[in-house]
Amino acid sequence: MAATLTSLHRLHLIAIGGSIMHNLALALHQRGARVTGSDDEIFEPAKSRLAKAGLLPAAEGWFADKITADLDAVIVGMHARPDNPELRQAQELGLRVYSFPEFIYEASREKQRIVIGGSHGKTSITSLILHVLRHQGRQFDYAVGAQLEGFELMVQLTEDAPIIIIEGDEYLSSPIDRRPKFHLYQHHIGVISGISWDHINVFPTEEIYREQFKIFADMTPKAGVLIYDRDDEQTQLVTVPSSPDVKYIGYGPHEHVIRDGKTYLLNKKDEEVPVQVFGDHNLRNISAAKEVCKQLGIKGKEFYEALATFKGAARRLELVREGAGSVVYKDFAHAPSKLKATATAFRKQFPKRRLVACLELHTFSSLNPEFLPQYAHTFDAPDVAVVYFNPQVLAHKRLPALLPEAVQQAFQRPDLRVFTDSGQLAAFLGEQNWEQANLLMMSSGTFDGLDLGQLATAITR
């Protein structure tokens, strides 16, 4: 049964409070569907956004009686468990149950699907493409894993758009579907931005993790296009041209110059195009996005015109505050490859300034003693390198206790400062000399509520 938008009038979302799930709920609501949902915890901004649309559940929790035979479909998010009572009720009633990626695919069967995969850079590449398409007045649908400036929602589904741009996460699709999300979208144009082992709780070895990208690459159809980072060793292993019917396009960092803390792209005429993002990884992201846009009929001149106003995706190397002799940035970076790329980019962008960089270990992989050695020498670029983690998070994830000395050993940096109290971290940063110095804060968390705005204000006075 194909999930054409016109055929779905009543939908229920299990785990409606999730970042992407609540955006899907809002997108379907805007389309005129009758949407209900449940979750056992809903945080901001999802709570307020759902409430404003009249979609916030009356009470948190799971309620089997919400699942009735007149529902057209149920969409289940990863936050739910396999034994979720609402999921069980839907299965017992024989209702169509979709995971998020499965639903997106079914709703875009008649569209050209462009899927951006990779361990890093996929949100930024997707954001770049969306920004350019909107600048050029193109009609498109999308699903992206971050809130983008100028876009009300992270998901848009319409009947008329001929294409859809999808950020293709390699994590599991749902509690009852253990396939990686990006295997379900069935791309026409695929991108692999790079491969760096992550999600150790699901993919216990580097080989198993890499195999997921090999499957994705091999799914590229006849007359399809596969765009990949030609310099990434792991990516090279899975994108070796294997089909004469597929167009393979490798890319590298866009040609550029850095001057006075600003990055300028060089076009074919060697003209300088100023951009608001920087770093080798972002220059590669730009090249990937340019190749995708070229496949969609957007010329180089049009691409560069749009790029001039691109500020980057939220939390991806995002400027917090700038002063006369210092800047404060935050970044979603937390995996080893992302950490190294971001810290190195900062060093190259501001070579004359001292760099203080802080990383929060927050994910299951980053806190796992078996995975920690992957961080060796990834944090060598900063003048002052700091790692923070909350011991309570370890307990919550049922991981063994972690000693600061073990973290220092894993990073192979004897002068690494390790904190387990956010108050002490804030005090340490406040005591630093911020004359001609920059601060970079990297995490998929919040440093346990550390007020970065207040800290940035004090630093950049």
Image (cartoon, rainbow, N blue to C red):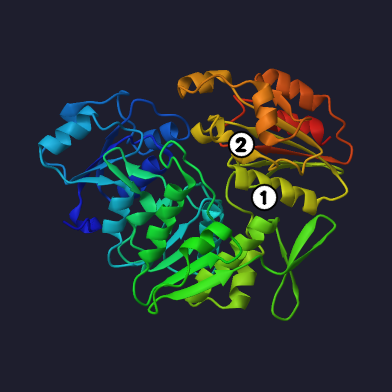
The image position of residue 242, as x and y in percent, is: 41, 72
Nearest the eye: 206 or 379: 206
Q: Which mark is residue 341?
A: 1
The image position of residue 449, as x and y in percent, is: 60, 25
Apparent side of residue 23 relative to residue 448 in the rendered image (left or right): left
| Displayed quadrant of residue 95 | top left
Residue located 48% across and 69% down the image: 240
Mark 1 Cα-neighbour bin, 10 Å: few <14, some 14–19, many ≥20: some
Residue located 30% across and 25% down the image: 58
The quarter of the image holding the C terminus is top right
Q: Check contact, mark 1 vs mark 2: CB within 8 A.
A: no
Q: Which amino acid does label 1 sit on?
A: Ala
Apparent side of residue 381 relative to residue 87 in the rendered image (left or right): right
Q: Mark 2 points at which residue?
A: 373
Q: Which of marks 1 and 2 is nearer the N terminus?
A: 1
Q: What element carries label 2?
A: helix
From this view, report whether residue 288 is shown above or below residue 57: below
The image position of residue 154, as x and y in percent, is: 44, 49
Nearest the eye: 224 or 160: 224
From this view, report whether residue 182 is shown above or below residue 269: above
Q: Is mark 1 on a helix, strand or loop?
A: helix
The quarter of the image holding the N terminus is bottom left
**Is residue 249 in sight in this rendering?**
yes
From this view, report whether residue 309 is shown above or below residue 151: below
**Is residue 150 in sight in this rendering?**
no
Nearest the eye: 420 or 407: 407
| Displayed quadrant of residue 457 | top right
The image position of residue 74, as x and y in percent, is: 22, 42
Apparent side of residue 402 relative to residue 224 in the rendered image (left or right): right
Q: What residue type is labelled 2?
A: Pro
Residue located 64% across and 70% down the image: 305
CA gap between label 1 and label 2 equals 17 Å
